[in-house]
Image (spheres, helix red, strand yellow):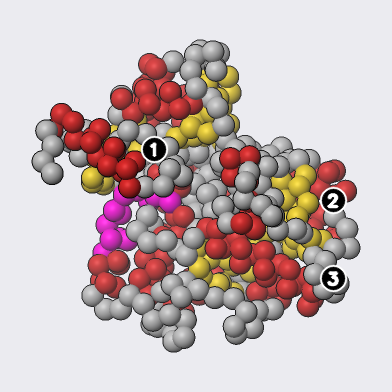
Amino acid sequence: MIVDDLVRTPAAMAEAERWTAHNYHPLPVVISSAAGAWVTDIDGKRYLDCLAGYSALNFGHRHPTLIAAAHAQLDRLTLTSRAFVHDQFATFCRELAELCGKDLVLPMNTGAEAVETAIKVARKWGYKVKGVPHDKATIVVAEGNFHGRTTTIVSFSTDPDARADFGPYTPGFKIVPYGDLAALAAAIDETTVAVLLEPIQGEQGVIVPPTGYLPGVRALCSAENVLFLADEIQSGLGRTGTTFACDDEGVVPDMYILGKALGGGIVPVSAVAADQEVLGVLRPGEHGSTFGGNPLACAVATEVVRLLKTGEFQSRSAELGARLHADLGALVGHGLLAVRGRGLWAGVDIDPALMTGRVACEHLAERGVLAKDTHGSTIRLAPPLVVEKAELDWAVEQLAAIL
């Protein structure tokens, strides 16, 4: 079908709507190419990507090192399944374990798979190591959490859009207010095997907990013989100015849950990393994934780990993030109600008397900036860590203009 250039985007949007289940409500942009922090739509218009695939594109679109690794591996080997060992597997697992300071790594594909892995491992650890009675294990989670959308995960979501009409729900979870250490302590009992938290809640609007909360969680978990599971799928791998968001307060969880940026925006890669006493509870046949830890994924993810080992991207995120938050802070009282976040990650609350977050993102797209709304009048900004200072300044100027 040949479509006039002036209507290519509306026609493509309509075609997508016609053939796709409506589980997303995308902005009216149809992207056809990208490089670095910029994307181009089918009509040739360029946009500064300030969402970065919900942090999956921390290193930008088509980072040359990562693309080269993918190309080289595509010419050699792409899949074996875990029935065999391939030559990229040990290197990836070792280098990621070293980055995390842990003994072992278990690779999967998506973030939700990694969270499910963490839940299963924590429960088995509870039964085999802690001695919790069979089928009585509980995990404490936080209100406002977002850990994925599987049936088990939405069972402990407090977001009605994610949870409603998907029951019956999986038992075994206790929900407490995020950032409330006393409530967390009260929820822990002899059945508790783990506390599962995002160090910064992304989907909720980039909510940063009170200073001292994460160290308090760490101390509480240690005292009560409970695993601290840190979901760093969005917050980790350089996004907040440190390798992991937990690093900002010197906290080391019992398990890192990783995804998104681990695949470099090329392939889906996730993993959990923990010590032998935790991940060592698994035995052959108890958990797995056909594509988890495949050769292509490992080749790309190994290069991601090596990029992080230089510290360059963490430093860029910290430096540019300070500039971003200062510039956004100047807009508070001038159309913005609040700004939250850390590094190159910001949750921005727009005065609802002006517009919703969706309308704000539509106006930003018209001006060449891509962002995503959440929860009414909040928008999230998470540009790739390769973004330049001038590009960040320009993005904030566009936000000021629509306000």
Q: Give the residue pinned by disc 2.
A: 187
Image point (63%, 69%), residue name: 274
Please state the extent of the stretch shown in magenta in the rendering.
Answer: 56-68
Residue 320 image point, x, y percent: 44, 37
User: Callout 2 environment at 10 Å: few (<14), some (14 to 19), or many (20+)?
Assistant: some
Q: Amino acid at mark 3?
A: Val
Image point (42%, 37%), residue name: 25
Q: Give the residue pinned by disc 1.
A: 26
Magenta highlight: main SS: loop
Q: Amino acid at mark 1?
A: Pro
Using the numbered discs, state the Cα–Cα distance from disc 1 to disc 3 in whole angstroms: 45 Å
Residue 92 image point, x, y percent: 45, 72
28 on left or right of 136: left
Location of residue 206 (image quadrant): top right
Q: Could you tell me which secondary element the residue under label 3 belongs to?
A: loop
Residue 181 image point, x, y percent: 80, 44
Image point (75%, 55%), residue name: 173
Give yes or no for residue 271 being in the magenta stretch.
no
